Image (cartoon, rainbow, N blue to C red):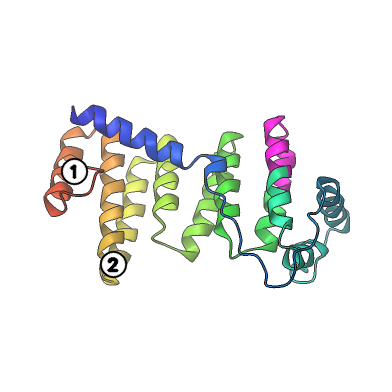
Amino acid sequence: PLISSLKTTTAAIVFAAAVFGKFHQLPARASPPSPPPTLEKQEEILEEETHKGRFEEDQENSPLTQFLESNSEAVEALKSLLQQKLEVGEDEEGLKILRKLSSAQPENTEWKFLMARLLNEMGKTQESREVFEEILARNPLSFEALFENALLMDRCGEGAAVLRRLEEALKIAEEEKKVKEARDVRFIMAQVQFLQKNVEEALQSYEELEKEDPTDFRP
């Protein structure tokens, strides 16, 4: 049945956005690889940054930034450390690592996605939304950020606001003639309508999307 399919699709998307499903390996440098840094080394550097209190003021020259740039294995080691912290329930420590990684590598939005999801898991909904908005400030048409932010807004009872937010994104996509992105936003809007129990509107939106592209599995 269609409704069951919609629920399955929604669950699949949320599951695909799970915390450890979005890591990507960074390209190795051309120079010979350095020995993998130990987890103890990562913690030592992170602790040093915290005590210096200068991380935000001097990102480019901070020891952590230099360490990440000079050692191709550093990010993998920090990911391992992050996983260890989260597996034993040390969410606050994991959050500290993510904040520092995000500041050291601002172009890598994966850190922000992970941070937003962790904040949400910790019950810090407003902070999670703020991070998603930071991502959207860089990429207003990011499907994952729009979708997950919309879910948070709807959960907070901002039903009308979330649709307005999505309409703004749709306008951007249409003005820039980005057909795929516009379709993605319309799909999210249909999902929100369904979650808000506006079933008839949601089904109508899905039918329109399906007519436009029958090969799209989502509707």
What segment is highlighted magenta in the picture?
81-97
Q: Is residue 83 magenta?
A: yes
Which residue occupies 47% across, 42% down? Answer: 17
The kind of residue on which mark 2 rests is: Lys
Q: What x and y, as percent, mark residue 206?
A: 18, 43
Q: Looking at the image, tell me whether mark 1 or mark 2 is earlier in sequence order.
A: 2
Q: Is residue 83 above or below residue 164?
A: above
Q: Which mark is residue 178?
A: 2
Which residue occupies 18% across, 45% down? Answer: 205
Q: Nearer the viewer, residue 67 or 118?
A: 67
Q: Which mark is residue 100?
A: none
The kind of residue on which mark 1 rests is: Tyr
Tell me which secondary structure the magenta stretch mostly adopts: helix
Q: What x and y, as percent, mark residue 104?
A: 70, 62
Which residue occupies 40% across, 45% down? Answer: 150
Q: What x and y, as percent, mark residue 82?
A: 70, 43
- Mark 2 nearby-residue class (10 Å; few <14, some 14–19, many ≥20): few
Element under disc 1: helix
Work out how far the residue at label 1 is from the one at label 2, CA to CA, in angstroms. 19 Å
Q: Which mark is residue 206?
A: 1
Query: How many numbered tags mark residues here?
Result: 2
